[in-house]
Amino acid sequence: MSGNSFGLLYCVTSFGESHGPAYGGVVDGCPPGLQLNAEDIQKELDRRKPGSSRHVTQRRETDTVEILSGVYEGRTTGTAIGFLIRNEDQRSKDYSAIAEKFRPGHADYTYWQKYGMRDARGGGRASARETVVRVAAGAIAKKWLKERYGVSVRGYLAQLGRIKLAFSSWAEVEGNPFFAPDAKVVPQLEKFMDELRESGDSCGARVNVVASGVPVGWGEPVYGRLDADIAGAMMSINAVKGVEIGAGFAAIEQKGSEHGDEMTPQGFVSNNNGGVLGGISTGQDVTVSLALKPTSSIRVPRRTIDVRGNPATIETTGRHDPCVGIRATPIAEAMLACVLIDHALRHRAQCADVAPPTKVVNPKKIN
Amino acid sequence: MSGNSFGLLYCVTSFGESHGPAYGGVVDGCPPGLQLNAEDIQKELDRRKPGSSRHVTQRRETDTVEILSGVYEGRTTGTAIGFLIRNEDQRSKDYSAIAEKFRPGHADYTYWQKYGMRDARGGGRASARETVVRVAAGAIAKKWLKERYGVSVRGYLAQLGRIKLAFSSWAEVEGNPFFAPDAKVVPQLEKFMDELRESGDSCGARVNVVASGVPVGWGEPVYGRLDADIAGAMMSINAVKGVEIGAGFAAIEQKGSEHGDEMTPQGFVSNNNGGVLGGISTGQDVTVSLALKPTSSIRVPRRTIDVRGNPATIETTGRHDPCVGIRATPIAEAMLACVLIDHALRHRAQCADVAPPTKVVNPKKIN
Amino acid sequence: MSGNSFGLLYCVTSFGESHGPAYGGVVDGCPPGLQLNAEDIQKELDRRKPGSSRHVTQRRETDTVEILSGVYEGRTTGTAIGFLIRNEDQRSKDYSAIAEKFRPGHADYTYWQKYGMRDARGGGRASARETVVRVAAGAIAKKWLKERYGVSVRGYLAQLGRIKLAFSSWAEVEGNPFFAPDAKVVPQLEKFMDELRESGDSCGARVNVVASGVPVGWGEPVYGRLDADIAGAMMSINAVKGVEIGAGFAAIEQKGSEHGDEMTPQGFVSNNNGGVLGGISTGQDVTVSLALKPTSSIRVPRRTIDVRGNPATIETTGRHDPCVGIRATPIAEAMLACVLIDHALRHRAQCADVAPPTKVVNPKKIN
Amino acid sequence: MSGNSFGLLYCVTSFGESHGPAYGGVVDGCPPGLQLNAEDIQKELDRRKPGSSRHVTQRRETDTVEILSGVYEGRTTGTAIGFLIRNEDQRSKDYSAIAEKFRPGHADYTYWQKYGMRDARGGGRASARETVVRVAAGAIAKKWLKERYGVSVRGYLAQLGRIKLAFSSWAEVEGNPFFAPDAKVVPQLEKFMDELRESGDSCGARVNVVASGVPVGWGEPVYGRLDADIAGAMMSINAVKGVEIGAGFAAIEQKGSEHGDEMTPQGFVSNNNGGVLGGISTGQDVTVSLALKPTSSIRVPRRTIDVRGNPATIETTGRHDPCVGIRATPIAEAMLACVLIDHALRHRAQCADVAPPTKVVNPKKIN
């Protein structure tokens, strides 16, 4: 399996470039009988859509999805679900100025070296616009997880540049264009973004994702751990430079007597492990945190080289997100959902006949 | 491919339990013609071996490897390399006290729920002793990477509990049982570990791993990114809770004008991206950082439940590492090496005919 | 990887149903730099196209392919190649009569049982119209194999019902709608097909496929044998019930002194093994032979049951190939080409550094 | 996944060479809770064991299996099952005469070309002795299939050279060293083999394998068809040159009105399709037939070349099966069982929630 597919049983294949005719994907392995229509996917795509506020790229795309297969009379058939999202607002001329130079921090240089050529229009295959496919595949995964196992996968912006956001409530997350979990901080975010945009620079972000209702038992030791697959999936998102599960890097400074989550008949009393022990879900919330680097396409002039190896200066105009983290929440949710459904299927393949010996109830809610 | 194998072309399969007769593995896909004997593997196993200082588990294992196939007249044949490491010092009775209870922070509970049973002796399959297989597979990968491409994969302890270690030199790393990159800090580490062991508690750690000499071009967009596969591989190591590439979580607070690594005809001037852009290696050092949680098996009494769901107290005696991070350096190196060889092979499969259009030379050393 | 993808490094993913909006596919892993346009694919699709003679289904489809990604300025970029073929001539009402009954010999019954539902229009996902995707993927594979290694992949109809066709020349194969390798036999085939169609019945066929110019060394022991992957790929074609490599079933009655292909400095003197020994190509022609069963959709009344389990009679009107074997030649070629490119890539991944120790030249041409 | 592993969820990895220290394997993905001990595997190995009659190789191997992991207190744990079979009777000097020449029909030449070297002792990795691993993995698969789903996987010798064997009863198959399904023909087989051995030549064979009790619904369209995976698995067995499912090549001359298996409320009335329609099991017997070529290692002198490309004559003494088909029955059963368990797991992963809408009962027994 080459690099444009992921998942063992819920297998997502992606294609498309920023300025090509379309993006599309294939979801293979979805269980049959799931009620599904384009609107189920569209509503997730709309959460990721560009142009929804002044703080993100102004490229105008409706991101309208067309389901091409795998659904019959409103239900999944169990065969491959193909879907298509046409590009509508390519402006390839925006890129002529940078086609022969490499943006610092961007994949321009590495694609060119690897393949001996590159599609410079909008980053080509390296564009974060590819995440539209992930969100579509994740929408199907989320729906099945919710209906079959009651699993919710939700995320929020936890940090924007130096501004840390405390979690207030899930309800607030959907009420603002930042996926901020606290409405009160939104004006501060807007001010920060306005100044950033003005300066022509970009910033990084942290996104947290949480899956609630995951049953105990999903995940496969030793290499196929649930958390290993989550880490790989998250790091495959454009701009992600770090992934934490549970306590993450804070675990370094914890003592074992502090980190290890105690258990009582009422459930776990903490969730430092982020819902995964030994690579297998515990029944607690699965908690994941991502670091996203600042966007590479900025108006601030930077030193680089051109395709002949000569020194050059580059500044990227055109339409870009000054912080890719703002739209990353639905993407991270989608990736977590895809990993979870894959492991749900893998688990029941091997362990369908296991009668779980007991159940620890009511794990303490952490988020 | 189920959970006990990893790698697409350099495929490692692992088996064994802490108190079973043996660990072993199969490396499939190794290029033919590599000079290889047991000693090449043994020297890496010896770096990971238990009992090498008072700061790690006192279980006495020689970890002697036997190569069973795939090598003929001192060279790899291109067929599957099978190898075996017999367990020699099982003390299963150590575990009778905890067989019916679940250690907080350990996989005891999740294995039992997933499979309906568990091998409680030494953690069974969940024991970090499984990493002996990773180190053996990584030894072969390292040797090939070094001989074929001049790639070095090295790591060091970067933090022990709250003690942060500055990098001094690679030479110092091998001269102490902590893989500390600065000999001067060793007495402080020893004092800290002696006190920790005395207290019956455990601590976390940070390990950094660096691959030098990686050519530009390894890694596959979109999901098969080099950094995505590294993240997955690292998170699959026992006790790892976080992974960073390059600037990692520090990228959140960076501006784009700070993070994006500028290029000159002399090379990149910084390495915030950790040697990977768009999922493809840049030719710079690949830099990875891991968070390891504190060991779950501690003597400090903790609340838990038993297999019947009743409240209980547990304290784990027996032989355990008070900090698994101390022996994690060779393991992390092995995983990085395995991912790199896999992508080296994948890259030349697809791109063997690409004449790289130019080369940015002398990337600045960052470590 | 679920059932709608195949290939390890040249990975083909397929979607679409007979009466859905479109078929499409993704080819992942194609080497970069290959000149490719829609016409390269279209000419192979046209060979498989329905309605090209009175002896095949009269469904009117232009099978026009649209390349959606992976090609930039006329060359493959190394990223995923997505393509789309819209359905144009669905007549779903043709199927209302059989929607609640199961055609003997068809997948109607098994899909319904497996998935709890089925798309009865034109066989849904089970329709042989899916092979349009294979032919498109194979067209790319063929072009690369030809340009990079000089490999030709060609096939012909070797038997139609009881009429056996002797090979005359490759030139004649393309000059008739049967892919018959001898123009003289075409009138006999036409007469046979006219009578068959008249009778409302169908017949089976044999197709032979040959790859010439395959270098020695492609294929991986033990399970990943070249012939094993060929057999799997061929048996995955609709209606195929048997696969032979080289002498095939005739090998049963051969003696070892007859079967084993002798070698001289001028090459092999025979090709009973069909170009594969120990799962690895020998450098001779790779020869494959397929048995295709007669079409299940026939006008002859047959006993069956309905969805409630009651006895019923079924006769299938509508538009069907009375012999699927007639259009199978380009499909079988495509599958062979896809397996070959996959193994070409796999071989150079592992063995790029092997200097082949010697070469047996001029293997005798067999076909 | 490289060539020494097969299976998506029930994944078998194999290693070992004919004259190396040992063969071994890893079965990953076996459901937990299956009662399993070495004797369960040993009894299948004993059926394949060399030296059991004068008609097979006289190499003396007890083929004693040691289970190294994955079983605890007599039950599978759900983790990787490692096992080892030491070689005991290597006579490498037997091969010095042929180390620099290539046996016609053998993998000698192709391994040497592919890898630039070969282990000439006993065929190295290409030796059919590798099938010991398949039989061990198949023994576990068979046991689970029988206990969980009531599936029986059985085979018999259907043709030896020109002698065709009619099926009489399963009971007779185990009562003679040929796996002949009719005891009366055994003297004829013995006479034939004695003459063949005398002549220094070898012969081919046909083996039939049947799986009874397979539920309807196993198998994945389009490429992951049950019959496609069976064909691939069978063709991966040493010496196999052809595979048929159901009517196989006889389907070429059948009419649709003859081939398509009619259905009644009492079940299918015939089984031309061999228990698979559209790649999915029908609930009937799954019937597979294999062609095995004659052994390449014969005493009859043959033309060949040496490693320098010079003409040479070769005759192979040493210990060889004059007909590999004689011991192939347990191997073919094992491969079929491994494919079936893999698809059993895959099916319940995706379709665990499907309530099969109806059931066709009492399919007519066909074998």
Image: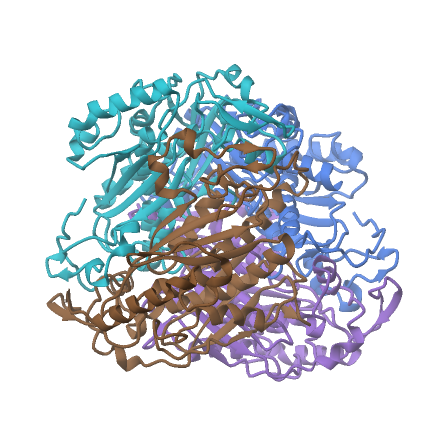
Chain colours: A purple, B blue, C brown, D cyan
Q: Position of residue D133 (x, y in %)?
A: 41, 32
Can you say whether A163 is above or below C336 in the image? below
The structure residue drawn at horizontal position 29% and vertical position 50%, both measured from the top left corner, is D248
**Relative to B38, D80 lies left or right:** left
State whether residue B318 appears in this view: yes
Which image quadrant for residue B337?
top right
Say how many tags the image has.
0
Choose between B19 and D50: the one closer to the eye: D50
State whether residue D32 appears in this view: no
Can you say whether C115 is above or below A227 in the image? below
**Relative to B303, B298 lies left or right:** right
Can you say whether D106 is above or below C245 in the image? above
Choose between B351 and D158: the one closer to the eye: D158
Can you say whether B196 is above or below A171 in the image? above
Q: Residue furthest front?
A: C184
Q: Position of residue B201 (x, y in %)?
A: 56, 37
Choose between A37 and A336: the one closer to the eye: A37
The structure residue drawn at horizontal position 31% and vertical position 70%, both measured from the top left corner, is C123
**Relative to D180, C127 lies left or right:** right
Q: Position of residue A256 (x, y in %)?
A: 55, 42
Which image quadrant for residue A97?
bottom right
Q: Position of residue B68 (x, y in %)?
A: 52, 26
Which image quadrant for residue D279?
bottom left
Choose between B256 and C24: the one closer to the eye: C24
